[in-house]
Image: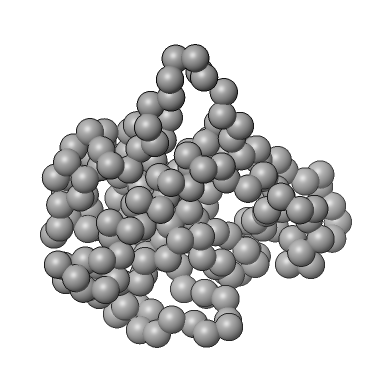
């Protein structure tokens, strides 16, 4: 069985967590501070990372670099985003329309709400992504979200409507899927999933 990232929540404290608390985490542990709560988890494993890398790579060419597509986006893997009462949140992949964020920040954190996020579900972060992060993304007005389940080989795409997520598509083995907000260029969803593990290792 593949070890997956584990997510935990710190015990309540009278002192709000800060970036210093993140810096003090032990090796191999990463964290986010969302709405004043520190969440910690082990670093993602290879199967998780490979799915995120595949999604990012397929979108970056046409939408970030304008190669074979319209351009007009910044596509970033695991960006550090700083928002009010949330000094560090990092989607697995995120995108910004350049009309909203014309230039990439230099050494500064990103302080603009993404237009699109993608989270890769893992065994022990599934609840964190769905119960904590997805409602938070809706709260701050992220327009689109994708949730990719690498083990189930399923991607669900959502659009924010009236403050709530609406499913706009479910994908698995499509080789030419058109998925909002990147529906102007087809993508090969089937390529994003990790190889099926041999029976002996399951």
Percent coordinates x, y for residue 178 in the rendering: 16, 49
Percent coordinates x, y for residue 92 in the rendering: 48, 53
Q: Residue furthest right?
A: 14
Left or right of 43 in this view: 173: left
Q: Residue at x 22, y 33 (%)?
A: 173
* Residue 153 in sight from this viewpoint: yes
- The answer to whether residue 194 is above or below residue 11 is above
Q: Residue at x 40, y 45 (%)?
A: 51
Q: Nearer the viewer, residue 123 or 36?
A: 123
Q: Residue at x 62, y 63 (%)?
A: 88
The N terminus appears in which quarter of the rendering?
Answer: top right
- Residue 96 found in image quarter: bottom left
Q: Residue at x 49, y 82 (%)?
A: 105
- The answer to whether residue 192 is above or below residue 143 is above
Left or right of 125 in this view: 143: left
- The answer to whether residue 112 is above or below residue 120 is below
Percent coordinates x, y for residue 164 in the rendering: 38, 47
- The answer to whether residue 124 is above or below residue 53 is above
């Amino acid at each position: 069985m593949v070890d997956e990232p584990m997510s935990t929540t710190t015990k309540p404290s009278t002192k709000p967590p800060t970036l210093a608390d993140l810096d003090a985490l032990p090796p191999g542990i990463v964290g986010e501070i969302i709405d004043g709560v520190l969440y910690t988890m082990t670093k993602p494993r290879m199967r998780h990372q490979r799915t995120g890398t595949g999604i990012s790579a397929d979108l970056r060419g046409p939408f970030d670099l304008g190669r074979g597509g319209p351009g007009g986006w910044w596509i970033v893997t695991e960006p550090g985003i700083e928002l009010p009462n949330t000094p560090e949140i990092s989607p697995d992949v995120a995108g910004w329309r350049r009309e909203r964020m014309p230039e990439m920040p230099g050494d500064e954190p990103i302080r603009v709400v993404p237009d699109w996020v993608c989270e890769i579900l893992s065994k022990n972060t599934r609840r964190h992504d769905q119960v904590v992060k997805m409602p938070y993304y809706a709260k701050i007005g992220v327009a689109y979200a994708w949730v990719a389940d690498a083990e189930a080989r399923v991607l669900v795409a959502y659009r924010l409507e009236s403050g709530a997520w609406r499913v706009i598509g479910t994908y698995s083995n499509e080789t030419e899927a058109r998925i909002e907000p990147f529906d102007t260029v087809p993508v090969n969803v089937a390529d994003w999933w990790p190889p099926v593990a041999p029976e002996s290792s399951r």
